[in-house]
Image (cartoon, rainbow, N blue to C red):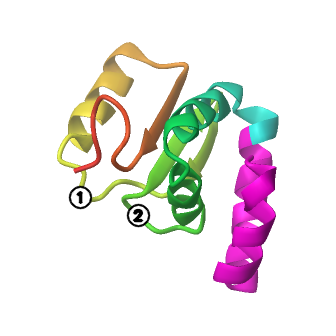
Amino acid sequence: MDKGTTDQKVSSQWSEHERWLITQGQHRIRAKMPEVYKTILRYAEKDKSVWGIVRMGLTGRPDFFWACEGGEVVGAPFTRFARAVEVSRLMARFGCAHVCMIAGHGDLGGS
């Protein structure tokens, strides 16, 4: 992901298990979820805090980051996201190639 800041932030702020979860999640996103990765990069271009938000979701904290693509799922669900039910219904009804939800970013916002 953002190699310039990833190694520093992952090593200083997180427990050993959380670092492992972050590393595994980032690897899965880069290797198997190209559209999700592009979405993260696009938002991170405008707001560097996106990397921290993604890491929070990768460690299992809900309401920060969740994504799916090609049968792969990473992050933690949005439990307080008022429109999560709407997103779920749209996914079930119309299908989707990928979904990337980042708290506070995108058309659906994060509240």
Query: Hey, which quadrant is residue 10 in on the image?
Result: bottom right
Q: Residue furthest left?
A: 82
Q: Is residue 5 magenta?
A: yes
Disc assigned to residue 4: none
Residue 68 in percent (x, y) is at 56, 37
Q: Is residue 106 magenta?
A: no
Residue position for label 2: 62
Span colored in magenta: 1-29
Is there a contact, CB below 8 Å, between mark 2 and mark 1?
yes
Q: Residue furthest top?
A: 94
Residue 107 in percent (x, y) is at 30, 28
Q: Earlier in the sequence, mark 2 or mark 1?
A: 2
Q: Amino acid at mark 2?
A: Pro
> Residue at point 71% right, 27% down?
34
Q: Secondary structure at mark 1?
A: loop
Query: Which residue is at the front of the view, 108 or 21?
Result: 108
| Residue 19 seen in render | yes
Dominant SS of magenta comes to helix
Residue 37 against residue 93 in the figure, above or below: below
> Residue at point 22% right, 50% down?
111
Residue position for label 1: 80
